[in-house]
Amino acid sequence: MQKDLKLKCKPNVLEIYSFLMYHSFSGMAGIIRIGISLLFLGVAFATRGQVEGIFTFLLVLVGLLNPVVTPVYLYLRALRMEKAENAIGYELCTDEIYISQNGTRRRMAWAAFPLIVWGRSSLMLYVDGSHALLLPRRQMDGREEEIFEILRSLPKNCRVRLGRHH
């Protein structure tokens, strides 16, 4: 077991925000969110002048929640998360990973992550369906090739999505 691939990572606000936005607006949930907003805005437009102005205003307000308020909320959340979190140390091995933060060290098998995604700008180790540890590729100290090889060699019981390598 090799234990020499050590990284210290701390995602920045934009990396966290990008992840949060993706999970808020991707897939069927994202389509439903935008669809509901369009429905409210469509009803507001179709009924303008036929109903009281306050009703039209409320329809527009509710219609703007997902496309306007949610992104602002997620950005503010990303700011809070970035400020609250300390850098996380990672020690990547071929059969497990060690994660260290705030004096606590935890060993996990790669198979313990429900999904591992090698993305364009980050390695994402999902701990559940919408939460992940983000390892920004900009903080991999030129060791992307070694990390990519570890991911390629993981057993079949690990759900790994290898997107763009370079």
Image (spheres, helix red, strand yellow):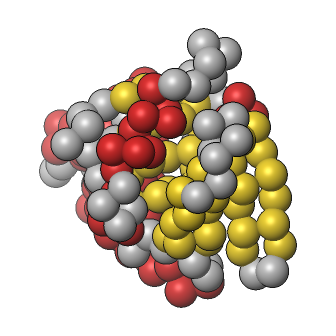
Q: Residue at x 72, y 69 (%)?
A: 100
Q: Residue at x 54, y 57 (%)?
A: 5
For this rendering, which residue is in front, 60 or 119?
119
Give the answer, above or below, for where 152 lies relative to 73.
above
Give the answer, above or below, for where 9 lies relative to 121.
below
Q: Is residue 86 left or right of residue 103?
A: left
For this rendering, which residue is in front, 22 or 103?
103
Q: Residue at x 24, y 35 (%)?
A: 164
For this rendering, which residue is in front, 79 or 90?
90
Q: Is residue 70 left or right of residue 40?
A: right
Q: Is residue 109 left or right of residue 6?
A: right
Q: Quadrant of residue 103?
A: bottom right
Q: Quadrant of the C terminus?
A: top left
* Percent coordinates x, y for residue 17 in the rendering: 39, 63
Residue 110, visible in the rendered structure: yes
Give the answer, above or below, for where 27 lies relative to 123.
above
Residue 65, visible in the rendered structure: no
How many discs appear? Answer: 0
